[in-house]
Amino acid sequence: MSSLSRAQRAESIAEGRHAVIPDAAIRVSMPRALDSAAAAVRPHTARLPMRRLLFDVKTVHAGTSHYRSARARRQRGGAVQARAQDVEAAYRRHAQRLDRIHHPPGTARHRHPVGPIEQVVLRHSRVRGLVFGAYGEWSSDVEWLLEEAARAAARRDWRRMGCPSESVAYSRIVASYRRRMGLVAVREMARHRIRQSAYVGLTRQQLDDIMHERERQRDRREAAMVAADRSVEIAQSYVVPAFERGA
């Protein structure tokens, strides 16, 4: 998702500034997003009408500030819930930064209290955080997506499964989805820790150098993709008109 033109995207990539790109955009019916610690204690269970929602996947590692917070001590899953609620604010800050760069207040496209890029983010309601913790736990939005996927599968397959009703099929499917998701979350967190063990003992400067080199490689790949798209557009501007003329 981006409100930037192709030329602006190329400029942003060259300068290390990226567009607002969620990990997923899904049309789904889900309960109201949890926006506070109090809401997490007694969450709304009624599902809102189906609409397109934006999702961002995050992880929380053991020993970080999220696990040391008072909320993590008071609430079950408090660390992942707190991280999930940070996602919306981070998206809006990023959109505001891009607006300041590309659409400063007073320009033709910035006629409202918020800039055009931030408006796109706001049109999709609250950005949901799909957060996985160090101990196999996950945020409420992950659970709600699992439940919605299980409902859809039960509606489609309950007769083929030999179940007496859709609700029986749902209970079996959602339990299977939770087991599989829990195993995947724990396994991938372990794999991540093993991969990161290669950096143990390096200095902060060495780690920064590695990170900057990765960013430069990613920027070069993205710039090459933009250049390739532009080359195709230029070629089509010559080839297609010639074909239409019967040349």
Image: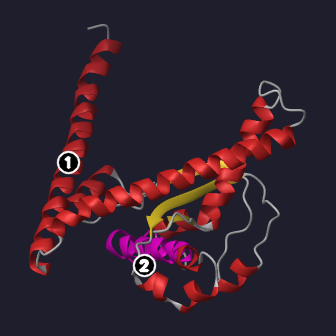
* Residue 199 is a magenta residue: no
Question: Is the residue 103 above or below the residue 245 in the image?
Answer: below
In the displayed structure image, the side of residue 48 where residue 195 appears, left or right:
left
Q: Quadrant of residue 65?
A: bottom left
In this figure, which residue is indicated by the disc labeled 1? Answer: 221
Q: Are marks 1 and 2 in contact (CB under 8 Å)?
A: no
Of mark 1 and mark 2, the one earlier in the sequence is 2
Outermost bottom residue: 70
Q: Where does the image place residue 197, in percent across and percent down from the top left?
A: 22, 65
Give the amino acid type for the residue marked by disc 2 in the picture.
Gly
In the displayed structure image, the side of residue 46 where residue 76 appears, left or right:
left
Q: Where does the image place residue 79, in percent across and percent down from the top left?
A: 53, 78
Q: Quadrant of residue 196?
A: bottom left
* Residue 97 is a magenta residue: yes
In the displayed structure image, the side of residue 93 where residue 18 appears, left or right:
left
Magenta span main SS: helix
Discs 1/2, front: 1
Q: Where does the image place residue 20, in percent across and percent down from the top left?
A: 42, 62
- At 42% from the left and 78% from the top, the residue drawn is 106
